[in-house]
Amino acid sequence: MPINPKQDESSPDYGEQPFIFHLIELRDRLLRIVLVVALVFLALAPFANTLFSVLSGPLTAHLPEGGSMVAIEVASPFLTPFKLSLVLAVFIAMPFLLYQIWAFVAPGLYRNERRLVLPLMVSSTALFYAGAAFAYFVVFPLVFKFLTATVPEGVAVMTDISRYLDFVLTLFFAFGIAFEVPVVTVLLVWTGMVTQDGLRQKRPYIIVGAFVVGMLLTPPDIISQTLLAVPVLLLFELGIFFSGWFVAQKAEVDKDSADADDPDDKPMTEAEMDAELDRIEAGEDEH
């Protein structure tokens, strides 16, 4: 069935239109993502230096007397704050980015899959933000306090601003990903790759693995390693708890669909997919 209702089967483009349609849809959504990120970046650019000062606050608050941050490369004072603004623009636009991904893939999912995937996307975004916030407000002060307190006598602490930015972005990413453990756990149980009991039996290996990951993703000190490993373990337990609820919900929805033979729970035809995309587009235009 062609996507365009007016398209005739004798048309040379018959049968190729659906693939082209999806490519056009993907292109449009990528362009929207780029546009939103660019607009947020332009809004943040005038405050680039202020944003960097805020980001460097956890380090400068613990620098010893006479210590300061330096710019080794010629263009670092200009480029580093703008690099931070760009990364922050992507960070802020993440909900919109995920919404575009969701709007693109949702028409191809079963109705029960849409009911379960949407909460996972929302929770994964919130958990990533929570991980970044935990890194800034909890980990950074403790790590920088520890690192600056261990400086040998006679050594001046003068951190390069570009290397500092790379360092903190790595920690943001590490803690943001680490906080996704509940979502990963739920997906593993939901897809049937593992069971709740199987995960509980592997708890000792998870504990060792959490500290190994903390050692690899954080600076070489026991404080930051522990601060990453302990939340991962707690979130792992949270994921085991919620995975039972998701599995129960999936089983209930599948049973109801099987009993009622609900046509809405079958894969969408191309015409239905086109109508669903048009509905999403109309909703965006209204907003």
Image (spheres, helix red, strand yellow):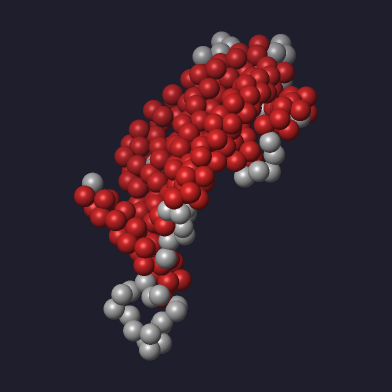
Identify the residue shown where x is 62% and y is 21%.
234
Q: Quadrant of residue 175?
A: top right
Identify the residue shown where x is 55% and y is 41%.
251
Q: Nearer the viewer, residue 237 or 59?
A: 237
Left or right, 92 with reference to 162: left
Classify 134 as above or below 260.
Answer: above
Identify the residue shown where x is 44% and y is 50%.
260
Left or right, 20 with reference to 243: left
Classify 275 as above or below 280.
Answer: below
Classify 74 as above or below 142.
Answer: below
Identify the residue shown where x is 44% and y is 24%.
54
Residue 77 location in percent, x, y? 47, 36
Q: Nearer the viewer, residue 194 or 263?
A: 263
Q: Is residue 275 visible?
A: yes
Residue 100 location in percent, x, y? 40, 50
Q: Quadrant of the N terminus?
A: bottom left
Q: Quadrant of residue 52?
A: top left
Q: Is residue 107 visible?
A: no
Q: Nearer the viewer, residue 83 or 103?
A: 103
Residue 44 location in percent, x, y? 35, 37
